[in-house]
Image (tube, rainbow, N blue to C red):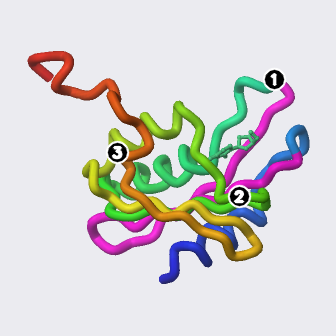
Amino acid sequence: MDLIKAAKDVRENAYAPYSGFKVGAALRSDSGQVHAGCNVENIAYPEGTCAEAGAISAMIAAGETNFVEIAVIADGPEPVAPCGGCRQKLLEFAAPTAKITMATLDGKSLTTEVAELLPGAFDRSQMGNA
Ligand code: THU
């Protein structure tokens, strides 16, 4: 399944009445399954969750813990950049070289590796024994 298409489809279900900015994310896990998520906002603004977090939760709920590729899409002028918190979340569940494609509804896209999004990330090695 095309990940950008899956992200675009799930984006339609985003609940974003406060920002008006709908985001969709779809990832392919190790097994080849696609898991998708969208942003879910809340009147208590900080309680909102990002599309990437939703896709990760769907993967975990399905019993998997690693993805090889993810696509994120929104209707912005430039390919949507995952927020800082999502960058850390993505690194938890993928190899540093996992592919991420950021896209716009009008067809622009940018592809890189998840580790490129978070130089100097806090990781297991810093805890010494983890
Ligand atoms: N948002 C995401 O879901 N993912 C991103 O990569 C960037 C931002 C959401 C959070 C909030 O619901 C809205 O976009 C505006 O920040």
Q: Is residue 121 left or right of residue 111?
A: left
Which of labels 1 and 3 is toward the front? 3
Q: Are marks 1 and 3 in contact (CB under 8 Å)?
A: no
Q: Earlier in the sequence, mark 3 or mark 2?
A: 2
Q: Nearer the viewer, residue 56 or 21?
A: 21
Quadrant where the C terminus sits is top left
Which of labels 1 and 2 is toward the front? 2
Q: Is residue 72 left or right of residue 68?
A: right
Q: Nearer the viewer, residue 120 or 46?
A: 120
Looking at the rendered structure, the secondary structure element under dot 1 is: loop
Magenta residues, start to end = 20-44
Q: Disc 1 beta carbon < 8 A from ligand 1?
A: no
Q: Earlier in the sequence, mark 1 or mark 3?
A: 1
* Residue at the spot 78% in from the left edge and 61% down from the top edge: 75
Q: What kind of residue is marked 2?
A: Glu
Q: Which residue is mark 3?
A: 115
Q: Is residue 9 left or right of residue 59?
A: right
* Residue at the spot 28% in from the left edge and 55% down from the top edge: 97
Q: Earlier in the sequence, mark 1 or mark 2?
A: 1
Looking at the rendered structure, the secondary structure element under dot 3 is: helix
Looking at the rendered structure, the secondary structure element under dot 2 is: loop
Q: Which residue is mark 1?
A: 44
Q: What kind of residue is marked 3?
A: Ala
Q: Which residue is mark 2?
A: 78
Query: Residue at the bottom extreme?
Result: 1
x and y, in percent, of residue 106 in the image: 76, 74
Q: Are marks 3 and 2 in contact (CB under 8 Å)?
A: no
Query: Callout 2: few (<14), some (14-19), or many (20+) C-alpha neighbours within 10 Å?
Result: some
